[in-house]
Amino acid sequence: MMSNLDRISARRDVRRAASLLAAPLLWLLGIYIGALAILFLTSFYTVDSFTNQVIHEFTFQNFIDVFTDHAYLNATLRTLGVAVSVTLVCAFLAIPMAFYMARIASPARRPFLVALVLTPLWASYLVKVYSWRTMLTPESGVIAWLLHPFDVQSPGYGIVGVIITLSYLWLPYMVLPIYSGLERLPSSLLDASADLGASTLQTMRDVVLPNVKPAVIAGSVFTFSLSLGDYITVQIVGGKNQMLGNVVYQNFSLNLPFAAAVASIPVVIMVVYLAMIRRTGALENL
Amino acid sequence: MAAISLAGLTKSFGDVTAVDHINLDILPGEFITLLGPSGSGKTTVLRMIAGFETPSAGTINLDGVDVTMVPANQRDVNTVFQDYALFPHMSVQENVEYGLKVKKVAKAQRRARALEALESVALGEYASRKPSQLSGGQRQRVALARALVNRPKVLLLDEPLGALDLKLRQQMQFELKTLQRNTGITFVFVTHDQEEALVMSDRIVVFNAGRIEQVGTPQDIYEHPLTEFVSEFVGTSNVFSGAQAQSLSGGLDRFSVRPEKIEINSAVTHEITAQGKLKDIEYLGPLIRYVVDVDGQHVIVLSQNDEQNSKDLANHIGHAVTVSWRRDAMQVVT
């Protein structure tokens, strides 16, 4: 039973919480959710083909165009493929890196290693992508020079280049959640596994990986969504390939409703992705 | 042959010597307790026997075989961890089966053995639960089943009862002791709880600052502590030293007397008597605890709860009393 006094103090708590949260909530609702709502709404409008003015008439035409035109469908699949590949490459690189940082390196060196992983984030995005452009230059780039003795060609500018560059860009976002997941893993679990006769590899497979899975999924939310929305990297190192972001960018001024329809695709993919991983408990790891 | 033989075992972490030249033989089928305050090196010794730490010097023999450099996963010992260390993503059954699984025991057989082990700790019905769905005491039993299902020659227990409440702890002490007697497995038990050590062990090894202070049966350790540390860490003691010790005992430099061996204002006075002033009386239920000031030394006396006697003495606080004990109650300590 709540006494009157409790009720008053509860009411006061609500009021205090409201006054604290009002500004961020307004930001979230108005600028974030509101903008998304308008994006969806706009995607059902159309434009006057002479004036490029948005006509507020409800139509599914934009979506029909997106899903029937092979160019757009291919861009969607390519974008999805790049996002999945980047996520896999990042996970593949980040797990051993994070394991070294959290489990093998001495505790005194760990903050230094974390800082080291973060250093690429201090440099400008464009600088990093243009460095990769230089390195990926066919025939004369550093990559071509490195691969030459093995008789392998540089991937040059194209989808592989995009995957390499994006993997480099988003790797820290994968390393950090896995690092913190591994650091939280009680070392007694590793001892227990060895104690029961498991080799290092078996311990990795049976104990470490299942326990960092939520952290890997948390990291994948970053690498996947960041890759899904990227359109600059693909312009710089992607050759003639287009991703969904480029389609949005090109249609932005000509046909805003169509651009909105294309822009909704990654949002929908992301919502589906988040819904899929919700049951793994990984979202509590973010 | 000793089940475990430690020779010159030493472990340093940087400048800190956690374990300093330990020599110890543990007999097959023995329940041996490594007892000491935290930081005394007892857990480090256990971890070296398990193979989780590599000794800085010295050797470890299991059944006569030098295993000093053998990795943990190839040693025929199993451990029950202080935090139980159950795998959170596996069910109770999978946890218990894991050791058999990595040893490639056939599936049907390891199922049966795991279930049998779980039933032996009365957790047969919990096989499909996750560890997080169990209480502390139940997790403890799963950890025990997970270790015992491998039928190790030696079971290492690292303060396994520390996280349990008193009632449950006492029950588990009894169950562990029974289990050890029935299986004949050598138990190496680490604890900082001297009472637990006295109750459970065949032999106790008292650790202090990385060294062994004394090894002996619970009676040995309690009745005949060799050092002041042992006399005060295991039970409580009145340690007398210097001129006071000499005049009381007639020649001993330093000795200890257990509080329950001292009598206060008794009808029969024993060989050693001292005059003092009664400072305090504490009521402990079955026992009464007196504090007597003998020439500036606080002497603790424990007596059976004799209601009349304690009532009489209650009026004596601040007054002179006589304490006395038998000559053979005194134990020379260093």
Image (cartoon, rainbow, N blue to C red):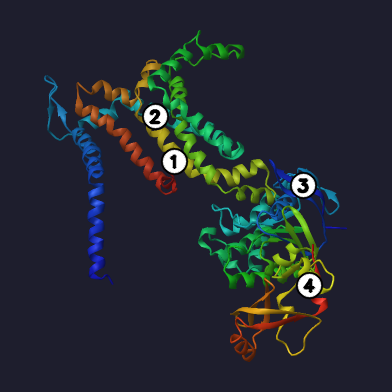
Give residue B133's position: percent from left, percent from top: 51, 61
Q: Which residue is labeled 4 in the image?
A: B223
Dot 4 alpha-carbon crowd within 10 angstroms: few under 14, some 14 to 19, many 20 or more? some
Give residue A273's position: percent from left, percent from top: 38, 40
Q: Nearer the viewer, mark 1 or mark 4?
A: 4
The answer to whether the residues at label 4 and label 2 have Cβ atoms under 8 Å apart is no
Q: Which residue is labeled 3 in the image?
A: B10
Q: Amino acid at mark 4?
A: Glu
Q: Quadrant of residue B249?
A: bottom right
Give residue B256's position: percent from left, percent from top: 76, 70
Q: Amino acid at mark 1?
A: Ala
Circles 3 and 4 on the same chain:
yes
Q: Nearer the viewer, mark 2 or mark 1?
A: 1
Q: Is residue B283 visible?
A: no
Dot 2 alpha-carbon crowd within 10 angstroms: few under 14, some 14 to 19, many 20 or more? many
Q: Residue under mark 3: which chain is it in?
A: B
Is residue B85 found left or right of B32 in the rendered image? left
Q: Which residue is labeled 2 in the image?
A: A227
Quadrant placement of the C terminus of chain A: top left
Circles 2 and 3 on the same chain:
no
Q: Nearer the viewer, mark 3 or mark 4?
A: 4
Give residue B33's position: percent from left, percent from top: 74, 63
Quadrant placement of the N terminus of chain A: bottom left
Q: Residue under mark 4: which chain is it in?
A: B
Tell me the SS state at disc 2.
helix
Structural distance between the alpha carbons of marks 1 and 4: 60 Å
